[in-house]
Amino acid sequence: MDTTAPSRLVVDLELTLAGTPREVFGLLCPVREYDWIPDWSCTMVHSVSGVAELGCIFTRERGETWITTRYEPPTRIDYTIVLPGLTVRTLSFVLTASGPRTTSAALRSTATALGQDGVREVLGWTAEDQRRMWRLREAQLNHYLSTGSLLALDPTPTATG
């Protein structure tokens, strides 16, 4: 077994969101993301409730499989994303009320290459690329929380998220 250290990229980001933790938490769901992310697309594989829950599984483009691995409403939700043969990524959201209708969301994205082919995947989507994409998602979510409608999609291409 090869025990060399895999390529890994960890990105931490703090988002400020215009809603309560309960309002925000409900929108960090593969079904509810259709409400506020214009380019969102997924296929539900398993969910007893039909929405995010512990053990919920859905797929996205490029063969990604997403699994809800931690589910603690309304303060924490984690997803593990596997791109077969390439990478394992985890997304962790920890929500804290920071005002009467404001939530601070501590986001951590960790990508680990599963082998040499995954190194390009990990290194190809830089920390700056991820920050740019998450700032767009922050704006989209805040727009939805404030207006109940979608924010027009930024024409800049982004990675999945």
Image (cartoon, rainbow, N blue to C red):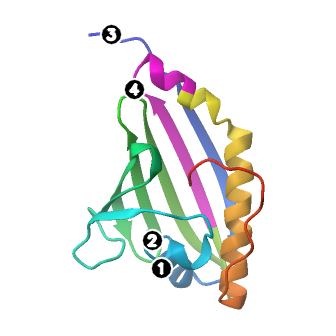
Q: Which residues are magenta?
A: 105-120
**Is tag 4's residue or tag 1's residue first in the polypeptide sequence?**
1
Q: Is residue 160 left or right of residue 144?
A: left
Identify whether 73 is placed above or below 154. below
Residue 137 sits in which quadrant? bottom right
Q: Residue at x 45, y 16 (%)?
A: 116
Identify whether 121 is placed above or below 38. above
Q: Where residue 50 sits in the image (x, y, percent)?
A: 30, 78
- Front residue of 112/39: it is 39
The single residue placed furthest to the left in the displayed view is 48
Identify whether 66 is placed above or below 143. above
On whether residue 73 falls in the magenta region, the answer is no
Residue that numbered label 3 is attached to: 2
> For the residues marked 4 and 3, what is the alpha-carbon distance in whole angstroms?
11 Å
Labelled pair 3, 1 in contact (Cβ < 8 Å): no
On whether residue 116 falls in the magenta region, the answer is yes
Residue that numbered label 1 is attached to: 26
- Per the rendering, the mark at residue 114 is 4
Q: Residues within 10 Å of mark 1 (few under 14, many from 20)?
A: some
Looking at the rendered structure, the kind of residue marked 4 is Leu
Q: Name the secondary structure under disc 3.
A: loop
Q: Where residue 97 sits in the image (x, y, percent)?
A: 61, 78
